Amino acid sequence: MGDIRAEIHKTGINEFRSCSITIARPAAEIFKILSDPKMHSVIDGSNSVKAVNWGPDKLSMGAKFGMKMKIGIRYKITNIVTEYKENEVIAWRHLGRWVWRYELKALSPNETLVTESFDSRPSHLNAWLRFRNAYDYADIAIAKTLVRLKRFAETGEAK
């Protein structure tokens, strides 16, 4: 697949990071991957999502799911779906209240623009995220996630 890159958007808001990529697949196929919590560890560009440890096979509005994580230390976190529109948008957050959102825009029947964002504006932990330099890292992790999503959606290859 050559050198695949996601576009990093300069939002001008430190607490809101966003990247996009075009994927040669229908939005419904991509949404199926994103709404399956078991796939999150496959496409995660941060390498912090290790596995789903409970939850539905397909996410929906209000669905909760647990993830096994590792950022320095191993831990478990519960997420809740906060936005959901089939084949168009899915977002979730955890107790830190930062939000991961995927927006899908069909460019043609077999091509979709996918935008992922990380939004910590609702969080009470922004000072901690600044201390950890999480914002600049978020750009890189989101871009890598979108590249992995593209690779998986187009070829079936996990990494």
Image (spheres, rainbow, N blue to C red):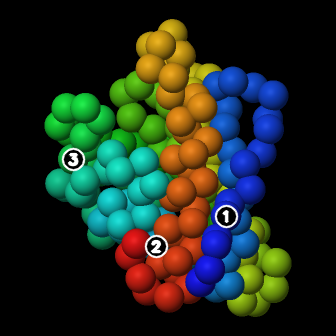
SS assignment at label 3: strand
Picture quadrant where residue 40 is located: bottom left
Q: Nearer the viewer, residue 139 or 91?
A: 139
Badge 3: residue crowd in 10 Å (few <14, some 14–19, many ≥20): some
Which residue position is annotated with label 3?
68
User: Does residue 45 appear anywhere in the picture?
Assistant: yes
Q: CA distance from mark 1 to mark 2?
A: 20 Å
The quarter of the rendered structure image containing the C terminus is bottom left
Could you say where residue 29 lies in the image, as x and y percent from the top left? 55, 82
Measured as percent of width and height from the top left, residue 26 is found at: 65, 84
User: Upstream in the sequence, badge 1 or badge 2?
Assistant: 1
| CA separation in Å, label 3 and label 1 | 27 Å
Going by the numbered disc 1, the residue's amino acid type is Arg
Determine which residue is flagged by label 1: 5
Contact, CB < 8 Å: mark 3 with mark 1?
no
The image shows a total of numbered marks equal to 3
**In the foreground, 140 or 115:** 140
Crowd around label 2: few <14 · some 14–19 · many ≥20 (10 Å): some
Q: Which residue is mark 2?
A: 33
Q: Are marks 2 and 3 in contact (CB under 8 Å)?
A: no
Indicate which disc, 3 or 1, sits on the residue closer to the N terminus.
1
